[in-house]
Image: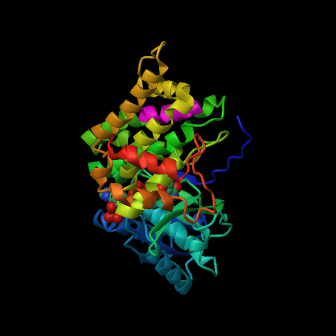
Amino acid sequence: MDNFTFYSPTYFVFGRDTEKETGRYVKRFGGTKVLIHYGGGSAVRSGLIDRIKASLDAAGVAHVELGGVKPNPRSGLVYKGIELCKKEGVDFVLAVGGGSVIDSSKGICIGACYDGDFWDFYKSDRFVEKALPVGTVLTIPAAGSEGSPDSVVTHEDGMLKRAAHGEPLRPAFSILNPELTFTLPAYQTACGATDIMAHVFERYFTNTPEVEVSDRLCEALLLTMIKETPRVIEDPCNYEARANIIWAGTVAHNDICGVGHAQDWASHSIEHELSAQYDCAHGAGLAVIFPAWMKYVYKHDTDRFVRFAVNVWGCKKNGTDPEKTALEGIACVERFFRSIGMPTSFAEIGAKEEDIPKMAKKCFDEINGDTTIGNFVKLGEKEVADIYRLALNN
Ligand code: NZQ
Ligand code: ZN
């Protein structure tokens, strides 16, 4: 196991009706004037925004609001939010929604404390050192941004989808009420589940030996997702299954299962070009990319893929032909994604073969001159293009 530090200071508030406590938590973490930031309407339609405003009013916390965040959030609304915060003297941003709303909020938090362009932190590996505090009320388990020190935004100039990182981006608090996820359509539920599993894959496929705690945590999270996702697709109001998924989503990405070993993240970079280019859901893009990535890299460490097949998917170990077991595991991943309604090929998300060279090149734009992505297997532009081609015909 490698040396590591682990600091995950978000205060998690879990369970029924917890959003009614929002005002109290904003106050506790120093907010006196709040920007309520939300998406395209689901949180308004469900009455959640009204409940949150009532809670802020009851706690005596002033607020302004800015809705309209789109999935794969864009820079334009972030700039608007920054201006609003500066004009109104906002000292706390409250994200009500999923990863897109939270990441847009984090972009606003960066820009509100910075004289330059907030995008400076997305186009370089410069860590964010100062930002307004952000709190979240999560409505979709997926991105894990409610506990992560990351924000992913797409700049409209060039449609570059890039991430910023830094400890100030970890939310001060996150409210996780599984009931708020009952209204999620099956497709969004499945996209979220895929993203959660992908966050585990990015950590599980590592070259660092002897990381049994992380390996076991990863396997437990994957087994949970395999059990609970079909249950909530069948019965969207199943509280216990929704509860397990929302907590799995947070644990999968606050890095508790990622410490002490190298992580990969190539598939996320490869996917981000798909969602930037075609505006598909991030989870759907991952369902297309991950089986292709696995087929491309499994020979690098067949034993790890055998362990994955046996411990996660219940495949029987073939003593004489480990490669067969490894491939069976990968086939299980693909079958599972299909069974929950995810696409697994390029055509299903409207992706085109002729865009492959452009996307493979763009993968390396504005990433500080690095010529490879990933760690398990380092991938250059050619290898990324090969993986896109494999995904054509999954
Ligand atoms: O906009 P509204 O109307 O709210 O609808 C949303 C949106 O259309 C809907 N939705 C959310 N909660 C709902 C609901 N509909 C009904 N009932 C509810 N309770 O779901 C749709 C998708 O929402 P979005 O926030 O886009 O989903 P997700 O949480 O998957 O976020 C995706 C974004 O997060 C980024 C992705 O790249 C993508 O841009 N990621 C962020 C990460 C991070 N910050 O750590 C890591 C991830 O790997 C990921 O890259
Ligand atoms: Zn993700």
Q: Position of residue 74 (x, y in %)?
A: 44, 71
Q: Left or right: where does residue 47 sit relative to residue 86? A: left
Q: Residue at x 50, y 54 (%)?
A: 269
Image: magenta residue range: 215-224
- Tell which of 17 and 278 is nearer to you: 278
Is residue 145 something one can see in this rendering?
Answer: no
Q: Which quadrant of the rendered structure holds the C terminus?
A: top left
Q: Residue at x 62, y 70 (%)?
A: 131
Q: Position of residue 32 (x, y in %)?
A: 57, 75
- Tell which of 295 and 54 is nearer to you: 295
> In the rendered view, would you say 304 is above or below 252?
above
> In the rendered view, would you say 39 is above or below 337?
below
Q: Is residue 166 magenta?
A: no
> Residue extending furthest bottom?
87
Q: Position of residue 330 (x, y in %)?
A: 41, 32
Q: Residue at x 37, y 72 (%)?
A: 68
User: What is the chief secondary structure element of the magenta stretch?
Assistant: helix
